[in-house]
Amino acid sequence: MRTKITWNPWQFFVLLLAGIFILPTLAIVNSLFQPFGEVWQHLFDTVLQDYVLNSLWLMLGVAIGTLFIGVATAWLVTFCIFPGRKILEWALLLPLAFPAYIIAYSYTGMLDFAGPVQTTLRQWFAWSYGEYWFPEIRSLSGAIVMLSLVLYPYVYLLTRAAFLEQSVFSLEVSRSLGCTAWGSFWRVSLPSARPAIITGLSLALMETLADYGTVQYFGISTFTTGIFRTWFGWGNPIAAAQLSSLLLSFVFTLMLLERWSRKQARYHQSSSRLHPLPSYVLVGWRKFVVLIGLALVLVLGFVLPAVQLMVWTWQTRYMLNSEFFALIYHSILLASMAGVIALLFAVIMAYGYRLQPNKVIGIGLRMASMGYAIPGTIIAVGVMIPLSSLDHWLNACLQQYFNISVGLLLSGSLVALLFAYLVRFLAIALQTVEASLGKVKPVLDDSARILGHRPWEVLYKIHLPMIQGGLLTAVLLVFVDVMKELPATLILRPFNFNTLAVRAYELASDERLMESASAALAIVIAGIIPVFILSKNIANSRQRIE
Amino acid sequence: MIRVLLYIVALCFSLNVLANEVNVYSARKEALIKPLLDQFSQQTGIKVNLITGKADALLQRLKREGQYSPADILITTDVGRLYRAQQLGLLQPITLPNIDSLIDASYRDSKGYWLGLSLRVRTVVVAKDRVESHAISRYEDLADKKWHKKICIRSSNNIYNQSFVASQIAIKGKEQAKKWVQGLVKNMARPPKGGDRDQIRAVVAGECDLAVVNSYYFGQMLGSEQGKDREVAEKVRLLWLNQQDRGAHVNISGAGVTTSAKNIDNAKALIEFLLTDSSQQWYADKNYEYPIRAGIEIKGILKQWGDFKADNLALEKLGEYNKDAVKIMDQAGWR
C-alpha cells in the first residue's frame, strides 16, 4: 500500500522552481491578451494553412523516421549478436552531435544540382538540366530525412536503455509461451519500453517544431518560419508571440493527450535482478542485411557529413588559432554549467512530483518543459521580459533609497543565458530523470520512509545511486544540446562572448559554408566525447548487473 | 582555478566598469566588422565591445533593456531595420561635422537618426553563354513573359527581397508592384531556396538563365580562394539595370546612436572612423560593397564592373513599405 505523504516544503519548492521556468513562457502567452491585428486576417487569407500543413507533414515524417530508425537500431544492437555490434552500440549515438542545420548545409553542398554528385553524374552521362531525375534535397522530404537522421538518437538512446533494463523473465516467459523473436518484440519488449520510446519521440518532435535553421535554408514555409516572417517582415513581434502561443498550446495538448493515454498504466519492472538478455545470433543473409542497414544509418547520419566538414576544414583552415580555443572554452563552459544545473533542478522537480503526485505539480512540470518546443529566439525574448523587468525594478528601488543606479545586472549576463538554456532544455533533463525514477518501484520509497528516513535521505541514499545512468544521460544530453544551441546564445550573450555555434552560424548564414566547417566540426567533436561516455555507461550498467 | 571562477563570476553579472569604451550592437556579422573595430581601438585607445545578432532580435534587446541598455551604437545591414529602430524610439539624432558633404542625402536620415556606412546593390547576373548582355535592361522586365521559368531568386523571407519589392511599391504604387511581383513569381525557374550564391550556382548549372543577387555575393565568389567558386562566377555576367532612368536598386549597411548611449562622443568618433577613406576602402576590398562616400577610389573587381547609376529613392521609404512588400509577396505565393 502506498502511504500518503504530505511534506509541504518540497511541494512549495518544486512549484516555485516550475513557476520561475514558466515565466518566460507566460511572457510569450501574454501576447494573446493583446489585440489581434490586421496581420491575422492576412495570414488566414494567404499563408497560415501552408504553415500548419507543412509543419504537420514535417512532424509526421520525422515521427515515422525517428521511430523506425531509433527503435529498430535499439532492438538490433540490444538483442542480436553480429560482428561490429560493440562499435555500433555507441557509434549510433554520434549523429546526436550534429546540429540539424549543419547536416543540412553539408548535404546540400554534396547533393545540390550544382554540387559534386550531380555534376559528376552529368559529366559521366553527358546529361544537362531537366534531362534526368535526381531527388531534390532542399524539399520537405529532404528536411524530414535531415531531421530524422540527427534526431533518431533520442529515440535510440532512451529505447535502448529501456530494453537493457527489461526483465529477462518476461522475455523468457513470452518465448516459452510460444512467441517468436518477432512476437516477443511486439508483445513484450515494445509495450514495456513504450514510455521511453514516447519520451524520445516527444523530444525529437519538439526539436522538430523548434527548428528554424534547416527549414529556412530549404525554403520550406513552416509554422516556425512563419513566426519569424511575421516578426521580421511585418515588424510585428506581438503577432509573432501570438503565433508562438498557438504552437505552445498545440504542444501542450499533445503532451496532455499522451499523459492521458498512459493514464493508469504503470511500467515497473517485475524483477530488478537482470540476467543476461536473450540474444539472437544472426547468420547468413540476415547478418549482412542488418549490418548494411545499421552501417547505412551511421554513414548517412554521421560519417558522410563529418567527412564533408573535414574536407572543408582542410581546404580552408579557417581561423584555427588561439581565438578558436576561446570559442571551444566558452562553449564547453556554458554547456557543462547548463548540464549540471539542469540536472539538479530536474532531480528536485521529478522527485518532488514523485513525493506528491498531484495535478497542480504535474501540470507545473509539463508547462516548465514547454520551452523545448519553442524556437530559441522566441524563448530569448521571453527570458528578456522578466529579467529586464527585475533589473528595472531593482534600479528603481536603489534609486529611491540609496540614490544609486547599478544598470543592468541580469540582462546581458551569463545568468540570463543559463536561464534561457534551462527554460529551453529543462524538458530533456526532466523527462530523462522522470523516466528513470519511474522505473524504481514505489515500494522502495515506502519501506525506506517506514524505516524512518526523510525524503531527501531516501533520494540521496536510494534513488540517486539507482538511477545514476539516467542522471548521466540527462547531463550529457543537455550538454550536447547547449553546445549546438544557437538563437538564444546569439541574442542573450554578453559583450565579446562567442561560442562555436555562433561562429559556425555567422559564417554559414553569410553563405561562407566552407569557412564555417571548422567551428561546426569542433561542435561535433566536442559532442562526441559525452556521447561516448554515455554509451560506455549504458553498456557498463548492464555488465555490472550481469 | 581561481581565475576561472573569477571569470565566471564576472561574466555572470554584467558589471559595468566605467572605462574609455564604446558598446556596439551589430547585425553585421563579426567577420565583417571586427577588423575595423580593432583598427579603431588601436588608433584611439577606445575599447570596443561587440555583440552581433539578428537585427530584430537586437531591437528587442535594446527595447527591453531600455534606459539602462549598455549599447551606444546599433549597426544594421539594411535600412529597414534602422527605420524600425527609429520608429521604436531606440535611436537619437546626432550631428557630425561635414556630414552634408560626406554622404548623399538619400543615404541618411534627414534628422540625423541614422546614416549609411556602405552601399549594397541588388541587381542581376546572367549566364554568359546563353544570355546577351542587352537582354534585360530594367527591373520591370523581370516580370516579362520572355523570362518564363528562367529566373532564380531566393526566398521572400530575405530582407533584401523585401526591400527590393518595397522599392517597387515606393516608385510604382502597390497595385503596379503587385502585378510586377505576380509576373516575377511566374517567371521563377524553381521554388525559392538557398542564398544568393546558390542562385548564381543554379544559373551556371543551367537551372535558370538569370539570378537576382546582391552584387557583393558575386564579388565574393569572383575573389574567392576556392577555385570552384571562381570557376562558377566566371561563367556569369553582372548587369546594371535601369541605367537609362532611375538607376540600380541600392540598400545600405548603416548605423545609429542609441537613445540610451552613455558614450556618445566615443560613438560619434567610431562612426566618423567608419567613414574615413581607409574604412570605406576596406568594405570594398574585403566584402565587395560600395563605399557610401562619393569619390573613394575603387579597384579590382568592383572597378571591372564599371560605374553605375544608383537609384536615389529616399531609403527610409524601404522601411516604410516593408510590411506591404511582405503582404504582396504572400499574396503572390512567393515563399
Image (cartoon, coloured by chain):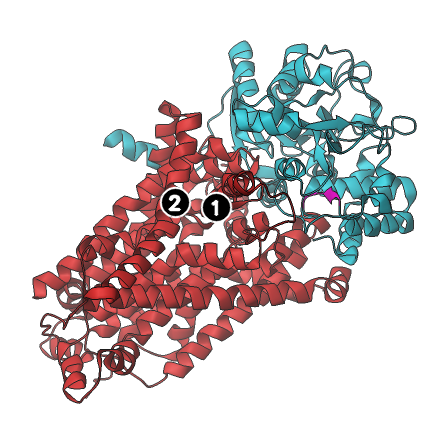
Chain colours: A red, B cyan
Task: Please tell me which of labels 2 and 1 falls first in the chain.
Answer: 1
Q: Are marks 2 and 1 on the same chain?
A: yes
**Chain of the residue that carries numbered disc 2 in the rendered image:** A
A336 sits left or right of A455 in the view: right
Residue identified by numbered label 2? A304
- Residue at the location (49% across, 36% down)? A406
* Picture quadrant of residue A470: bottom left
Which quadrant of the rendered structure holds the C terminus of chain A? bottom left
Q: Is residue B117 left or right of residue A194?
A: right
Quadrant the N terminus of chain A occupies: bottom left
Which one is in front, B186 or B252? Answer: B186
- Bin the neighbour count of mark 1 within 10 Å (Cα to Cα): few under 14, some 14-19, many 20 and up: many
Q: Is residue B300 above or below residue B119?
A: above
Please give the residue where the numbered disc 1 appears in the rendered image.
A107
Q: Are marks 2 and 1 in contact (CB under 8 Å)?
A: yes
Q: Which mark is residue A326?
A: none
Magenta region: B150-154
Give the amino acid type for the residue marked by disc 2 in the picture. Leu
Find residue B40 and report its horizontal and vertical position in percent.
Answer: 56, 15
